[in-house]
Image (spheres, coloured by chain):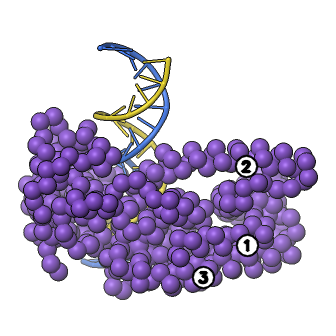
Chain colours: A purple, B blue, C yellow
Amino acid sequence: MPLPVVVAGLQQQPAARENPSHLWPPGSSSAYKSVGIYGHGSSSASLLVVPVVAADATEGRERESDRRSVAAAAAAMGRTPCCDSKGIKKGPWAPEEDKLLVDFVQANGPGNWRMLPKLAGLNRCGKSCRLRWTNYLRPDIKRGPFTTEEHNSILQLHAIVGNKWSMIAAQLPGRTDNEIKNYWNTHLKKQLRQEALAGADAAAQQLAAAGAASSCPAARHMTQWETARLEAEARLSLLSSSATTTVASATAASSSSSTAAAEHEAAPDIFLRLWNSAVGESFRCSAQGQGAAAAHGPAAASPAAAGTPAALRPAAPSGGGDDSSAASTNGTEAADDYQAFLDMAVEELALLHGRLGVSFSAFPTADVLAEASCLFAPFE
DNA sequence: AAGCTACGCAACCGCATCGTT
DNA sequence: GAACGATGCGGTTGCGTAGCT
């Protein structure tokens, strides 16, 4: 694999959003500052020309949660966790540190994050190095404002998978899960809230006038999907509780939703069933295949995050799919899987409506699911 | 011009899970 | 099967900046 090459000499000052000035200490040279704008998608400002790196490269051992116990255990075993020592620097990265990291990755490629700080002369933990690289220094990161397409894709994908940022990022080459997460928390959440309120108002007015539904189909279906997803999780949680404790069972029986669920012998939720089904798995696999290209490798794999039983977990991607071309290659398959996923949602819903009546009041009605065809947009 | 507030985002934290021994 | 190591990812925080009063 060809090693990254720095295209030196760029002196321009990056835009604030692309390279927040607060990251750079006063007195930092502009040459160093330019280090921060690798891969700027909308300009020729890319400083690095590198192959997209495998995101699942080895990483340092630095679980903070286990830091103390592991430190003791590791010490006993003759290993030294990378973050156990005092004096490891935290906080914003200095340009010098960025340069060291970039230089090292150029020379050796990403990977072995645990040893990287030591080898590169950085007073950082490996995890910090990996995050800095994957979220900021990596050359294929697309910076700048989100496009309308990206914006819509995020909305649509979030309506389906929820806060699976890595999975969403897998559909948006060049965007990191962290970036999408921040974008969601700062922009989209607010927007959806406003739209929901507006939609609710409009719906209330229309309902009062003609008994009609919401005036905003797109916002409505997203809201309903999200509501259904949350309700499904809540029901699943309740069912789980009721299955293990009689007290919980009695409590659960007192609520309407859990009663309905109990009456139907823990009838599986459509969404969760779909998500855990072969179709869902297929969709995840496709997303995963593409995702490896984007930010964090087999992010979509995260079967645990998707609540997938081990038996249903997709096999690891064979090739790693660690460049963005994979996304376009697999786009058609992903689209097929996506459509199948949505189709099955309609079928499952019809079945459940017939079987369970109005038990799943919060779940989108068939017409709403039909509208879900617009979710196809990101693959077209 | 100064102070205040809200916002945006990089970075950190810590949990979950997989793989290996 | 248990213990440990390694990795991925979602949630949260801290701080600089921009905008407003």
The image position of residue A190, as x and y in percent, is: 57, 44
User: Label 3 is placed on what type of residue?
Assistant: Val
- Helix, strand, or loop for circle 1? helix
The residue tagged 3 is A279
Residue A57 visible in the snapshot: yes
Pointer 2 with pointer 3, Cβ within 8 A: no
Q: In the displayed structure, does residue A216 sit left or right of residue A20?
A: right
Q: In the displayed structure, does residue A284 sit left or right of residue A356?
A: left
The residue tagged 2 is A199
Earlier residue among tags 2 and 3: 2
The residue tagged 1 is A370
Say which quarter of the image contains residue A105: bottom left
Q: Chain of mark 3?
A: A
User: Label 1 is placed on what type of residue?
Assistant: Ala
Crowding around mark 2 (Cα neighbors within 10 Å: few <14, some 14 to 19, many 20+) is many
- Helix, strand, or loop for circle 2? helix
- Helix, strand, or loop for circle 3? helix
- The residues bearing labels 1 and 3 have C-alpha atoms spaced at a distance of 18 Å
Whether callout 1 and callout 3 share a subunit is answered: yes
Say which quarter of the image contains residue A346: bottom right
